[in-house]
Image (spheres, coloured by chain):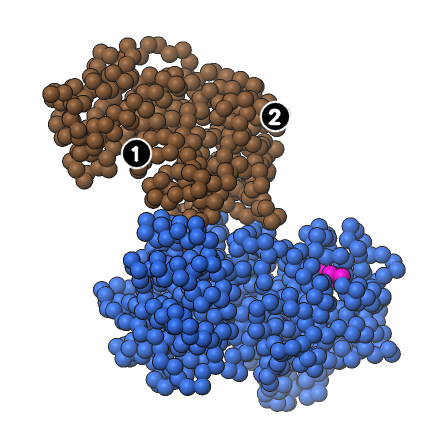
Chain colours: A blue, B brown
């Protein structure tokens, strides 16, 4: 009897077939295995089939993930002797899961530093357990000809490893050695050709010297370039910061956005940042994300790395080039910030790097292994022991989120800022990598090339399109253009409300069905009433929602300018809270703002010219941050709110919240926050410590969330509360809220596999669209329920 | 009792009776005076026109009626004259329809009509027919004016956005955003240090000068009114299937307009103008056209602001001062905040 076993999941490019080969050989089974377009197929016969099947599941290689396993019994006999690995079989219409890029494994690292090894100090060492994957794949099935390694012909030794199922490099597609593989060299810019004198480790050593002397070096990595400098060299860091420039949107020449750091090991990191157990584990994760770590009070890191911030974003080396930069380099930390100019996508090719980054980088550490898919570093933080993604990209993309049920291929175009898209295919959602803010044509191109790539990798043919309700988002335009180009009918184009998408995405991550209380607190999203929402309580399921409660509306004088300049929000909130008495308060606390500007904004508030209303929680945090004199301008997103969070004193006892009122109106509860503003202002006037005011404000927001959620729970019987949106990246608030909900017997759910910020919106859009497609073919009714 | 002695417009001024008659004779006829209007017939009978005829209409509902640099009357003439002019036509005749809200001070109407007449005279067009209606208080907003215009088009003139090609250059006739910001700041009582004046002006002579030296090199022109320069160029890019690449640093913007936009949170590229045109010109004609424009008082600040590229088709791109390239979309409606 032959058993035909079909396995789906992450089973290609992760050493799965050699594992099967070795297992079958050991158990004396005959037959073969091979990759096909949606996984691995095995045909075996022999006595120990049962042990084979159980070990298959239990001992699978570390990078693999089995999503499905079916066993069929076929008549007859294989007739072969022994067990073999056959060529890939590519069947149309099916797909398999590609592995993300994986950090250099310990085995390879050992060889890299072993003088006796033939890959000693070779910057492209890898095996089936590590190395580039997603970023070099040009097509499926995953085989060397369909990677950017296609142009490198393996030498006999590499080829022998590649063909030997017992070898760690069996079918390691990027397999290479100094004789046959890619090389690295240092360029002073101007040319991208390798120079003969400074190649390989010599080039890296030269880069070390330059970095030590204070140079900025552009370093080609896995998913793009980094701009590197010695993080302990204040002048070098300042030069890099000046070179990166600000963003068009913030209208600031440069921002204080923190730079990421890379250090050789955990011990060295300990010199300047605190890392808890779970944070150390996160740093060591195969994805090697940037992990936010608390700064130590004094340390060797230049102050320009993360000014005014309580955290450093830190990562460990994840490519052999990185390891070699630190090997004998003696650096405590290197700044490793994305190689791009403000608002542009990360640079990937040598020529692009020299062209775009010449104004910033003094030297270029280049190599000739192509980057097919650009992918930024991922960022996460550990909050109460749990990992929270802030940016999902390298090491995670193109990982999938199981949706638990089959469904149509849907393409969601995501939001405007921190954009990602999301494809669904079969029973999976495939969130695209972090694309960035859709302000630049290059970022749109990045969006389109990545979308094209993931679509073909997963062989997705979307039959429906989802986009944000906001007609002015570039992603909405891209969605409508796509639908038109692909003849997707109007009834298959879904405009999904921003906060509903936030909630639905979190539901999908946790497999929640039915209704939840969705608390979506963020900066801005267009509501169904054409005002800007952002402090929302939705009673929601995957297909629709009822806006049950929201923060009271505050005026935004100057529209988006009020998001960039929190002092405007502060004036707006004060104006609304105090009415005629506002000018006095404004004069007292905002003397620092140019009088003319202050007067004009006052007039805008009265005349309501370009002064839309918003129920945004993010803007409320901004306003309070500015009233406290912490931050009047957001140089990067969330800067003012973060300053407010960092200011809050650790409160030993429970603080009484500021007064607020719940006002029922047309079946919707409005949470009146004018009194909160008044409370903040009054305590400022009394000279109360800002750390205390900030803590009390946080407690107030937490109290609102807990009180309103439990009220809604009583009304609806729902016990699941989804906390989502960028505001829930505030760890202090999250801690207060989850404690409160726990006391009330409610279950809090938060994003884990996608960010709580707008990076998680696309997943939710896709999920809502899939749910609505289930309903009927002609019913477009969706979104808000009366 | 004559109509113009009343202090305010009454419903009777639109009733067809003697009040109305005296309004027409003592105000409209007096100000617009010309032989074609004088018969006060139900229609104006025009003399034969030699050439292709351009015909357009537009309605004016601006609030406030009077603003720095102009008023609704001047706007009603300039707007329609410019619609003719940017098609390459020489404006000849206008009609004028007035919808007046009961209670409008007669003095205000007089000022508007005088301003219209003056502007028409300076633009060389005649107001040859008209209409007056008075609506009940609250059914209108002080005064609305509709004008239609007839102009004549030289045979050699052929302007069409579809003829725009990669390599053409984009010229703006002067500073952008003046009109919209003047209206907004004046209406809302937002006083700027240097008050912004509307650029409201008839552009037909400017256009005439351009066409005279362009030798067919002008591909398309439009006055950048509602939606501003960005909207016009988006339409050009869409109609021609090209990309228009504009350089932020080259776009003329008055310092006071820039300042007002900064405070108000607007982008001057989307703000209305009433005396500015955008032209797409072939590369060889650009220098001559620009020279001719700068020789006209209404074009002294004219500047090349960008050029036409092959793709991405249908898109307007802006090279920003910090060196990246943004896509400038058409506004989907009012500008709603997007930043989270």
Q: Which residues are magenta?
A: A215-222
Q: Of A89 and A574, which appears nearest the observer?
A: A574
Question: Secondary structure beneath disc 2?
Answer: helix
Is residue A218 magenta-colored? yes
Which quadrant is home to the N terminus of chain B?
A: top left
Q: Chain letter for mark 1, please.
A: B
**Nearest the eye: B63 or A417:** B63
> Does the image show residue A223?
no
* Residue A169 pos. (x, y %): 75, 75
Name the residue beneath numbered marker 2.
B287
Looking at the image, residue A293 lies above or below residue B225: below
Tell me how far mark 2 sits from mark 1, CA to CA. Answer: 39 Å
Q: Which badge, 2 or 1, is on the more N-terminal residue?
A: 1
Residue A519 counted in the magenta span? no
Q: Both on one chain, marks 2 and 1?
A: yes
Residue B21 shown left or right of residue A469 in the figure: left
Residue at 37%, 12% (x, y): give it.
B49
Residue A201 lies in quadrant:
bottom right
Mark 2 is surrounded, within 10 Å at the Cα level, by few (under 14), some (14 to 19) or many (20 or more) other residues, namely some
Q: Of helix, strand and loop, which one carries label 1?
A: loop
Q: Is residue B37 left or right of residue A433?
A: left
The residue carrying mark 1 is B65
Verify CB contact (< 8 Å) between mark 2 and mark 1: no
Number of marks in the rendered image:
2
Q: Which chain letter goes with mark 2? A: B
Q: Position of residue B265 (x, y in %)?
A: 44, 49
Seen at 30% across and 34% down, the residue is B65
x and y percentages locating residue B181 in the rendered image:
41, 40
């Amino acid at each position: 009897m032959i058993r035909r076993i079909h396995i789906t999941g992450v089973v290609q490019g992760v050493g799965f077939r050699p594992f099967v080969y070795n297992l079958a050989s050991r158990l004396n089974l005959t037959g073969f295995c091979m990759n096909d377009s949606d996984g691995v197929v095995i045909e075996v016969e022999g006595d120990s089939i049962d042990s084979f099947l159980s070990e298959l599941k239990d001992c699978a290689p570390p990078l693999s993930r089995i999503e499905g396993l079916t066993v069929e019994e076929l008549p007859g006999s294989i007739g072969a002797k022994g067990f073999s690995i056959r060529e890939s079989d590519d069947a149309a219409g099916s797909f398999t899961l590609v592995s993300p890029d994986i950090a250099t494994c310990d085995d390879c690292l050992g060889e890299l530093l072993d003088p006796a090894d033939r890959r000693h100090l070779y910057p492209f060492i890898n095996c089936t357990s590590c190395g580039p994957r997603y970023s070099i794949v040009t097509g499926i099935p995953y085989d060397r000809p369909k990677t950017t390694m296609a142009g490198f012909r393996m030498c006999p030794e590499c080829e022998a490893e590649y063909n030997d199922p017992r070898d760690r490099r069996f079918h390691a597609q990027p397999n290479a050695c100094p004789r046959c593989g890619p090389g690295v060299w240092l360029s002073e810019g101007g040319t991208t050709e390798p120079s003969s004198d400074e190649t390989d480790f010599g080039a890296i050593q030269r880069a070390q010297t330059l970095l030590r002397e204070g140079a900025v070096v552009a370093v080609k990595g896995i998913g793009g370039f980094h701009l590197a400098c010695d993080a302990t060299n204040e002048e070098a860091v300042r030069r890099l910061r000046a070179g990166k420039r600000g963003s068009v949107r913030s209208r600031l020449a440069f921002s204080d956005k923190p730079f990421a750091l890379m250090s050789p090991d955990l011990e060295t990191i300990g010199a300047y940042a605190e890392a808890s157990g779970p944070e150390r584990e996160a740093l060591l994760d195969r994805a090697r994300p940037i992990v936010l770590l608390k700064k130590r009070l004094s340390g060797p890191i230049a102050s320009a790395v993360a000014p005014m911030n309580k955290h450093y974003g830190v990562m460990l080396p994840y490519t052999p080039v990185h390891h070699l930069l630190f090997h004998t380099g003696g650096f405590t930390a290197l700044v490793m910030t994305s190689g791009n100019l403000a608002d542009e996508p990360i640079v990937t090719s040598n020529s692009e790097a020299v062209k775009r980054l010449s104004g910033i980088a003094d030297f270029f550490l280049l190599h000739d292994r192509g980057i097919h898919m650009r992918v930024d570093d991922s960022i996460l933080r550990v909050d109460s022991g749990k990992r929270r993604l802030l940016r999902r990209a390298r090491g995670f993309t193109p990982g999938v989120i199981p949706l638990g049920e089959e469904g149509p291929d849907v393409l969601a175009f995501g939001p405007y800022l921190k954009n990602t898209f999301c494809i669904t295919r079969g029973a999976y959602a495939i969130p695209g990598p972090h694309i960035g803010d859709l302000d630049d044509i290059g970022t749109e191109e990045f969006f389109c090339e990545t979308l094209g790539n993931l679509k073909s990798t997963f062989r997705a043919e979307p039959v429906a399109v989802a986009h944000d309700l906001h007609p002015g988002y570039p992603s909405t335009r891209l969605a409508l253009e796509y639908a038109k180009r692909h003849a997707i009918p109007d009834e298959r184009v879904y405009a999904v409300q921003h906060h509903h998408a936030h909630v639905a995405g979190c539901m999908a991550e946790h497999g929640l069905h039915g209704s939840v209380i969705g608390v979506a607190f963020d900066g801005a999203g267009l509501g169904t009433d054409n005002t800007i929402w952002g402090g929302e309580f939705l009673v929601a399921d995957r297909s629709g929602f009822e806006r049950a409660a929201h923060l009271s509306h505050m005026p935004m004088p100057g529209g988006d300018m009020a998001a960039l300049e929190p002092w405007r929000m502060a004036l707006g909130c004060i104006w609304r809270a105090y009415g005629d008495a506002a000018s006095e308060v404004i004069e007292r606390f905002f003397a620092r703002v140019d009088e003319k500007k202050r007067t004009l904004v006052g007039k805008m508030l009265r005349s309501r010219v370009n002064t839309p209303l918003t129920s945004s929680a993010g803007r409320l945090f901004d306003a309070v941050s500015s009233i406290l004199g912490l931050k009047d301008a957001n140089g990067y997103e969330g800067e003012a709110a973060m300053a407010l969070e960092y200011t809050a004193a650790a409160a030993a006892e429970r603080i009484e919240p500021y007064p607020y009122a719940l006002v029922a109106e047309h079946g919707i509860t409005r949470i009146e926050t004018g009194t909160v503003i008044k409370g903040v202002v009054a305590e400022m006037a009394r000279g109360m410590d800002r750390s205390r005011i900030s803590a009390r404000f946080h407690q107030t927001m937490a109290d609102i969330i807990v009180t309103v959620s439990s009220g809604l729970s009583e009304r609806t019987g729902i016990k699941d509360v989804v906390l989502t949106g960028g505001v829930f990246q505030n760890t202090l608030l999250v801690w207060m809220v989850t404690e409160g909900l726990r006391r009330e017997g409610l279950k809090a759910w938060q994003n884990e596999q996608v960010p709580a910020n707008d990076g998680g919106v696309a997943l939710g859009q896709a999920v809502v669209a899939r749910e609505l497609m289930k309903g009927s073919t002609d019913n477009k009714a969706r979104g808000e329920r009366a | 009792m004559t109509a113009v002695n009343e202090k305010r417009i009454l419903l009777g001024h639109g009733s067809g009776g003697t009040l109305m008659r005296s309004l027409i004779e003592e105000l409209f006829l007096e100000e617009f005076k010309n032989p074609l209007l004088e018969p006060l017939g139900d229609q104006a009978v025009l003399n034969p026109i030699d050439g292709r005829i351009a015909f357009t209409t537009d309605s004016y509902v601006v609030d406030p009626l009077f603003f720095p640099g102009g008023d609704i009357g001047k706007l009603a003439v300039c707007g329609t004259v410019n619609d003719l002019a940017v098609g390459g036509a020489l404006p000849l005749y206008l009609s004028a329809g007035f919808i007046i809200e009961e209670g409008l001070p007669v003095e205000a109407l007089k000022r508007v009509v005088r301003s219209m007449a003056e502007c028409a005279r300076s633009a060389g067009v005649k107001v040859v027919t008209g209409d007056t209606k008075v609506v009940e208080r609250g059914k209108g907003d002080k005064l609305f004016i509709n004008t239609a215009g007839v102009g004549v088009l030289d045979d050699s003139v052929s302007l069409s956005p579809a003829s725009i090609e990669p390599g053409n250059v984009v010229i703006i006739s002067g500073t952008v955003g003046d009109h919209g910001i003047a209206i907004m700041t004046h209406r809302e009582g937002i006083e700027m240090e240097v008050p912004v004046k509307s650029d409201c002006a008839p552009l037909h002579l400017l256009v005439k000068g351009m066409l005279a030296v362009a030798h067919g090199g002008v591909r398309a022109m439009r006055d950048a009114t509602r939606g501003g320069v960005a909207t016009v160029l988006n339409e050009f890019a869409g109609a021609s299937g090209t990309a228009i690449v504009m350089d932020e640093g080259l776009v003329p913007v008055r310092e006071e307009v820039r300042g007002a936009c900064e405070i108000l949170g607007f982008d001057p590229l989307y703000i209305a103008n009433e005396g500015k045109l955008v032209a797409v010109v072939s590369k060889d004609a650009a220098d001559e056209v620009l020279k001719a424009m700068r020789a006209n008082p209404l074009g002294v600040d004219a500047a090349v602001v960008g050029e036409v590229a092959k793709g991405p088709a249908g898109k307007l791109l802006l090279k920003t001062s910090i060196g990246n390239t943004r896509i400038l979309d058409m506004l989907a409606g009012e500008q709603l905040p997007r930043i989270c």
